Image (tube, grey):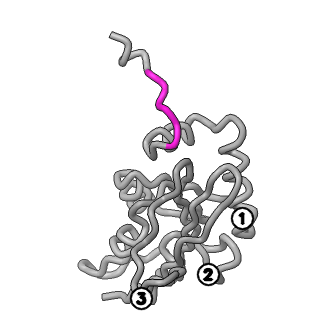
Amino acid sequence: MSSVRRLSLVTDEVHAPKPERQAGALRVAIATQDMKNLNAHFGSARCFVVYDVGREEWNLIEAVAFDDVSDESGKHRTEGDDRITPKLEALKGCHLLFCLAIGGPSAAKLVSAKIHPIKVPQPETIQEVLLRTQMMLRTCPPPWLRKVLAQAGVAKQKPSFEDEQ
């Protein structure tokens, strides 16, 4: 059984719950090894930093750290040793996950939990990821992001041809 630690900003309360998402913001998770850069594969990420990203600002919500991560050897462990589920549980409520790589089964589980995985070809700073996400929100978002925004209640979902009956 792996250990999961949640690090979050706390105001007055000893154990404050995860704050509600700001209106118009997307909850974005970034896979990281050092809390400064997007530089990890989904399975080997020691940490996910979670931000609420809006058109004008972003706010750190929490960092979730894991003790038991993949060694990126490509070999699976024995049955019953599940490292995906704790990560999936930790990311509940997120809309986007940025990582360097993710396997098909893990990506499918994220998509079924309404978390859209985004593979980035090379490491970059967390600030660059957040700025690019803001730029997509300010301009004309690509179709996949418009769908995520509609599911998150951030933007109206455009009617499809099937809805016009």
> What's the amino acid at mark 2?
Gln
81 sits to left or right of 150? left
Badge 3 local density, few (<14 within 10 Å), some, or many (20+)? few
Which amino acid type is shown beneath numbered disc 3?
Answer: Val
* Magenta residue check for 138: no
Checking the image for residue 161, the label placed there is none
Q: Main secondary structure of the magenta part?
A: loop
In the image, what residue occupies the spot 58% across and 66% down?
51
Residue at horizontal 55%, vertical 48%? 24
For the residues labelled 2 and 1, the Cα–Cα distance comes to 14 Å
Tell me which residue sits at (47%, 31%) in the image: 157
Say which element carries label 3. loop
Determine the CA span between mark 3 and mark 1: 38 Å
The residue beneath circle 1 is 122
Q: Where is residue 69 in the image (x, y as percent from the top left)?
A: 46, 83
Q: Position of residue 66 (x, y in %)?
A: 46, 84
Direction from residue 76 to residue 28 in the image, left or right: right
Q: Give the range drawn in magenta.
A: 154-159
Residue at image point 41% right, 79% down: 16
**Does residue 144 appear left or right of residue 141 in this picture?**
left
Q: Can residue 72 be seen in this view?
A: no
Work out whether 76 lies above or below 55.
below
Query: Label 3, on which residue?
Result: 14
Judge from the rendering whether residue 126 lies leftward or rightward of residue 66; answer left or right. Answer: right
Q: Does the magenta segment cover residue 157?
A: yes
Instruction: Determine the image quadrant of residue 57.
Output: bottom right
**Residue where numbered disc 2 is placed:** 33
**If you read the primary sequence from the N terminus, does the residue marked by circle 3 or circle 1 appear first?**
3
Closer to us: 65 or 84: 65
Can you give x and y, in whole percent of width and height, for residue 13 in the image? Answer: 43, 84
